[in-house]
């Protein structure tokens, strides 16, 4: 009989069980790089992989049990703090730190394969203090915060003692165009007063979430990309009210969750503004590049785990006289998945290298490409794995249904596919200006 253990992969009302074929009990084989890693990256990669093997995968079941047994879905399982303490001792902490501000930190290209390994487990990134949205928020405060803001908010975030959220998307406008954002940030003497409604503020349900970066309108008459600003808002400020939790395809993503929040006459000191009025889009340009590449690498790690599940399940089930792995269509799915994962990884590493060499702004096209490619690739691989696993694939007994929901949501997070495709097309068209009057035959 197969051994039975609890899975980390959640359902709406709690956790359930799955059999030994779920990849949560499988040791990861590590990331396959398509060109050589630096010696430093290879050494850290080995250590991160060993930590995942020895600590994180085994903790998934404990995490599930503790969350289910807690007083609410929003209580933090103690095992996550144990993992974080072990990662600190192992020197595997805050690996995401931007090299521009921390000369001894890893480059984007060096960090990318580590992020992929962490992304194989839903609790992996947090164990290393490398989870969203905290990494993006920390980078924002590192780059644009004042010394006082860094002491109050960055230091505890770097220590992992608090968490944060990013409040940008609004339910009443098409937030894919951030110029539509209508939350008001109005100067009133030595304060700013904030009024508006945000949703998909990920992490705001977490009791450790203490600070929000809020994007809103400071000057509606300014040039389109100078109207918005970002400001730090402590969540315990009077007038900040969490209205409800939002589920993702029925998953609650506890204990972090996604919240709809009302900001009603919220008053914070003017010193909480980031960089200055009208600098919101400038900050977003610096923040979203690394955040997007982190999302993509986690998607690649998730897809690798799904492919492992597909292969193992295909070899362990025998319908109609031969294993699923012997069926031609399954073999083609496995081959397609391997090719697509490696293609997505190569493109993502190329984007990381360009970010390192020429900067986030100059690498916008490549960042946009990976943001489309990686989650769509992951969805294909996960869907094939679900099909191979049959009814189990859509149940809570495997990680696949939850993984699919997460990958599908990433096609909206940090901008929908359509916006990124427009960016890619704009850059591509700019390479090929037309002049029909000079070269009429060239375009026939």
Image (cartoon, rainbow, N blue to C red):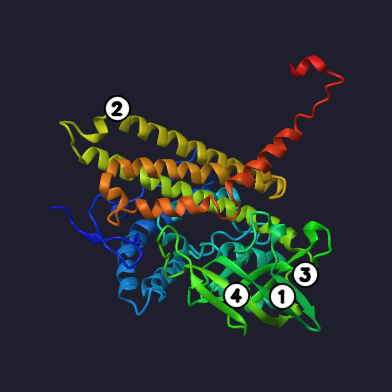
Q: Earlier in the sequence, mark 4 or mark 3?
A: 3
Residue located beneath label 1 in the image? 147
Task: Identify the element where label 4 is drawn.
Answer: strand
Task: Decide: few, some or many residues near mark 3? Use Cα within 10 Å; few <14, some 14-19, many ≥20.
Answer: many
Residue 75 place in picture, x, y as percent: 40, 76
Q: Earlier in the sequence, mark 2 or mark 4?
A: 4
Residue located beneath label 3 in the image? 218
Residue 76 place in picture, x, y as percent: 41, 74
Spatial CA span between label 3 and label 1: 23 Å
Residue drawn at x 30%, y 48% is: 393
Spatial CA span between label 1 and label 4: 29 Å
Mark in the foreground, 3 or 1 = 3
Q: Is residue 386 visible?
A: yes
- Image height of 209 relative to 251, above or below: below
Residue farthest to the top, as pictured = 441
Q: Which mark is residue 262?
A: 4
- Image height of 123 relative to 263, above or below: above
Task: Identify the element where label 1 is drawn.
Answer: helix
- On the rendered structure, is 271 left or right of 404? right
Residue farthest to the front, as pictured = 172
Q: Is residue 40 visible?
A: no
Task: Identify the element where label 2 is drawn.
Answer: helix
Mark in the foreground, 2 or 1 = 2
Residue drawn at x 70%, y 59% is: 180
């Amino acid at each position: 009989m197969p051994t039975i253990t609890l899975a980390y992969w959640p359902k709406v009302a709690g956790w359930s069980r799955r059999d030994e074929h779920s990849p949560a009990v499988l040791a990861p084989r590590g990331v396959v790089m398509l060109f050589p890693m630096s010696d430093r990256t290879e050494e850290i990669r080995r250590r991160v992989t060993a930590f995942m093997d020895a600590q994180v995968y085994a903790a998934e079941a404990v995490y599930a049990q503790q969350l289910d047994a807690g007083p609410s879905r929003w209580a933090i399982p103690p095992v996550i703090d144990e993992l974080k303490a072990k990662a600190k001792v192992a020197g595997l902490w805050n690996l995401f730190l931007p090299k521009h501000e921390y000369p001894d930190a890893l480059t984007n290209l060096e960090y990318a394969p580590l992020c992929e390994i962490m992304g194989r487990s839903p609790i992996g990134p947090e164990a290393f203090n490398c989870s969203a949205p905290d990494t993006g928020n920390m980078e924002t405060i590192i780059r644009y915060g004042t010394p006082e803001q860094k002491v109050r908010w960055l230091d505890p975030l770097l220590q992992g003692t608090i968490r944060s959220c990013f409040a940008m998307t609004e339910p009443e406008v098409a937030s894919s165009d951030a110029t539509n954002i209508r939350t008001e940030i109005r100067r009133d003497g030595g304060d700013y007063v904030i009024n508006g409604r945000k949703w998909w503020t990920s992490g705001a349900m977490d009791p450790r979430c203490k600070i929000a970066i809020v994007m809103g309108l400071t000057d509606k008459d300014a040039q389109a990309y100078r109207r918005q600003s970002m400001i730090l808002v402590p969540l315990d400020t009077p007038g900040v009210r969490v209205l409800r939790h939002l589920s993702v395809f029925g998953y609650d993503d506890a204990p972090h969750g996604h919240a709809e929040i009302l900001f009603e006459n919220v008053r914070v000191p003017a010193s909480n503004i980031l960089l200055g009025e009208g600098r919101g889009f400038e900050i977003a340009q610096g923040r979203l590049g690394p955040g997007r590449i982190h999302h993509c690498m986690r998607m690649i790690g998730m897809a690798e785990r799904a492919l492992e599940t597909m292969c193992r399940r295909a070899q362990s089930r025998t319908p109609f006289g031969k294993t699923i792995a012997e069926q031609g269509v399954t073999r083609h799915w496995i081959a397609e998945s391997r090719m697509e994962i490696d293609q997505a990884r190569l493109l993502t590493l190329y984007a990381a290298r360009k970010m390192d060499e020429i900067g986030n702004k100059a690498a916008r096209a490549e960042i946009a490409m990976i943001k489309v490619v990686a989650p769509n690739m992951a969805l294909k691989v996960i869907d094939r794995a679900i099909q191979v696993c049959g009814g189990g694939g859509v149940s809570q007994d495997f990680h696949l249904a939850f993984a699919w929901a997460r990958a599908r949501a990433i096609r909206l997070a940090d901008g929908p596919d359509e916006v990124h495709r427009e960016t890619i097309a704009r850059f591509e068209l700019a390479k090929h200006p037309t002049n029909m009057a000079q070269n009429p035959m060239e375009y026939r």
